[in-house]
Image: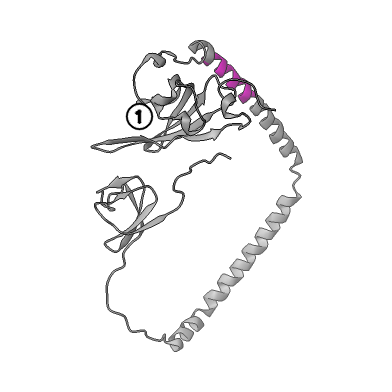
Amino acid sequence: MSEINLGKVMLSWQGEYDNAKTYTRLDAVSYNGSSYISLNGSVGVLPTNAEYWGKLAQAGKDGSAATAQAPDLTQLKSDVASNSAEIASASSTANAASAAASQANRAIQAIDLSPLEQNITANSTAASSAYALASSAMSEIQRKASGGATINTDILNANDDDKTPDKYKDGFTYEMRYASKIGITMSDYVLNPPTVIVGLLTTKTYKLSAMQLAHQTYEVSATNEPYVFMRIGTTTKTSDKTISKWTDWVLVKTSNKLSDADRFGGTINS
């Protein structure tokens, strides 16, 4: 069974902040009595920098212990007694309001809402149908205007190495790429693969808050068994630098029905 690396998914306590240590997302530290959680990977960035750190708990204030003093119950009883009339009045008002609310609730329940519900259902169905037709029409218009999605095969002739996530524009990008050029070593997954592995690289790029995200899938071509890899890229920008990086590739789909000799040619084993 293939495994998917989800990375760090919970807080990881790192103790007192160390200026020379590299921290990753979800690392937590103590600094000047307060505790902080890392929002982005960093090194040498103080926890007081809100762009990279979030505060978990504020340090308390130092001070001497106070002496506890028992409350004066006599005065308390006197205060309660002096306000008994106001308390009784407030209670009576609350009871009257509760009775009125109960009466209003009974009146509402007596109303026959079934015709209104039928109208709402009918209108909702009509609106859903109209939205579906409009979406279909818009998709067709966009498809005709763009001539349909195209796959860039010219990249096969380029000697460019792997691109960082920030080099992709928002939206979808399709490319035919050599596996070796984007950091995939097929010999890690199959014995004696062909020297040259070609596949379809699909990139989906979008912005989420202040971060740009990119999802890539790589589908190996010309095999008798599907090989699909995935990775995620993040790009964060500050006033003086841009950090753009990919996670490691993860094999997320393969049928495992073929022998090593038949994966890139031959027939499926019975």
Position of 239 with respect to 13 (left or right) is left
**Which residue is at a point 67% across and 32% down the rendered structure image?**
124
Q: Amino acid at mark 1?
A: Asp
Relative to 235, residue 168 above or below: above
**Which residue is at a point 46% across and 49% down the rendered structure image?**
9
Q: Front-most of 246 and 86?
A: 246
Position of residue 182 measured from the top left corner of the image (x, y, whole percent):
40, 27
Q: Front-most of 131 and 143?
A: 143
Image quadrant of residue 2?
Answer: top right
Position of 120 with respect to 14 (left or right) is right
Image quadrant of residue 103?
Answer: bottom right
Query: Magenta segment, principal secondary structure?
Result: helix
Q: Front-most of 243 and 240?
A: 243
**Which residue is at a point 24% across and 51% down the rendered structure image?**
20
On whether residue 139 falls in the magenta region, the answer is yes
Q: Secondary structure at mark 1?
A: helix
Q: Front-most of 96 and 214?
A: 214
Position of residue 233 measured from the top left corner of the image (x, y, whole percent):
40, 34
Position of residue 75 measured from the top left corner of the image (x, y, whole percent):
43, 86
The span shown in magenta is: 130-142
Which residue is labeled 1 in the image? 166
Q: Residue furthest bottom?
A: 74
Q: Quadrant of the N terminus?
A: top right
